[in-house]
Amino acid sequence: MAILSSRIGKADLPTSPPFVKPRVMDSAPLEEEVTIPREDGLRPRAFDDYIGQSSLKQVLGIAVKAAIGRGDPLDHVLLYGPPGLGKTTMALVLAAELGVKCRITSAPSLERPRDIVGLLVNLQPRELLFVDEIHRLTRVAEELLYPAMEDQRLDLTVGKGSTARTRTLELPPFTLVGATTRAGALSSPLRDRFGLTQRLDFYCLQDLQAIVRRTADLLTVPLTNKACMEIARRCRGTPRIANRLLRRVRDFASVKTKMTVIEASIVKEALDLHQVDSSGLDESDRRLMKVIFHSYGGGPVGLETLAAALGEDPSTLESVIEPFLLQMGFLQRTQRGRIITSAGRKHLESIEVK
Ligand code: ADP
């Protein structure tokens, strides 16, 4: 019966996602960004404030309007893509557009069945439940979710052995928004239960510039357009990093200069100090490229070998560091392993000459 009387206690609150090491260019939130909710004031709250990702906004905008028109909950949504591109933000936007609350959790904090049961039974009709890192759900949690997503019911086993019985609990209609950096790691039964599956892409320069401008205005940081562009060029196509770089530039400007306006030269100086190069690569990216280039003759080299050589976790390499290098065309994944492309070689040569 313990399962039925479960309540969400303090210990059940979402824990911060794991991260390997704090880097100014890490697209996962840094510890201070999780413990002090710095990102909250910066998050867009409506489709109109959410910059870029036009096809995502179009698809979800239509789905939201249709759901409101019918008075139904929004269909379950799966958002996937590298960290920091706006998956959590989009879940909050969806809730705001639907006029409902969004409950935020992450799969690692739903380890025990009662964690997920507690969340589901406490939902109000049409509310959103956002589950980050959904590929990390346990099998038990997943199996509880299947009937919940499909038929709004929970099948609970109460008691043990010969006295075990199944109790069914009706749930209010709700929307599950799942987010993952690794869509391929999701089991196919879970993937199939999402009515809408959308990928988030890295942002183009123009959108990043608009994001930096928006954050600078919110934080009242006086940036010239060229300075905005300089941050946009170095943030790996990722809004979370853009916002973080802007804060580092603001710190630098307030301590090191007496200028009332922050110009591109200040941005360059500040970001050089953090070893962020002109393409937005940081020390970890360059180390990965250098190891392939210098130790493995440019590749191919397998993921496990590369991870061991770098002392990194293979999944971090695959889901956090590599996507941007692939996007930049500096790295290629082949069946035989990772290869540095000629653009990658050129970039390495240009920075090694400096
Ligand atoms: P994810 O959940 O994909 O890791 P988040 O939704 O937490 O990423 O986004 C990180 C930060 O980036 C947010 O705090 C928000 O300020 C900013 N951000 C993300 N997407 C956008 C966007 N489309 N427009 C403006 N800011 C954004």
Image (tube, rainbow, N blue to C red):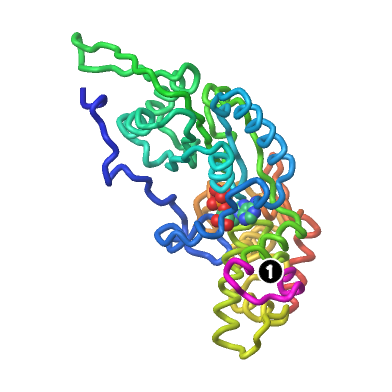
Please tell me whether the stretch drawn in magenta is mainly helix, strand or loop. Answer: helix
Amino acid type, residue under disc 1 in the picture: Ile
On the question of residue 322 being in view, the answer is no
Instruction: Name the residue: 49% across, 42% down.
Output: 132
Question: Looking at the image, is 162 positioned above or below residue 307?
Answer: above
Question: Looking at the image, is 1 positioned above or below residue 207?
Answer: above
Label 1, ligand 1: CB separation under 8 Å: no
Instruction: Name the residue: 61% across, 25% down.
Output: 195
Query: Where in the figure is residue 241, as x and y percent of width and height?
Result: 60, 61
Mark 1 element type: helix
Question: Looking at the image, is 202 positioned above or below residue 186?
Answer: below
Q: Quadrant of the C terminus?
A: bottom right
Q: Quadrant of the N terminus?
A: top left
Classify mark 1: residues with Cα within 10 Å, few (<14), some (14-19) or many (20+).
Answer: many
Instruction: Name the residue: 67% across, 60% down.
Output: 211
Residues rendered magenta in the picture: 216-231
Residue 343 appears left or right of 333: right
Query: Where in the figure is residue 283, as x and y percent of width and height?
Result: 60, 67
Q: Residue placed farthest to the top in the image?
A: 162
Query: Where in the figure is residue 26, as x and y percent of width and height?
Result: 55, 60
Magenta run includes residue 93: no
Q: In the figure, residue 107 lies in which quadrant?
A: top left
Query: Where in the figure is residue 126, as x and y percent of width and height?
Result: 49, 29
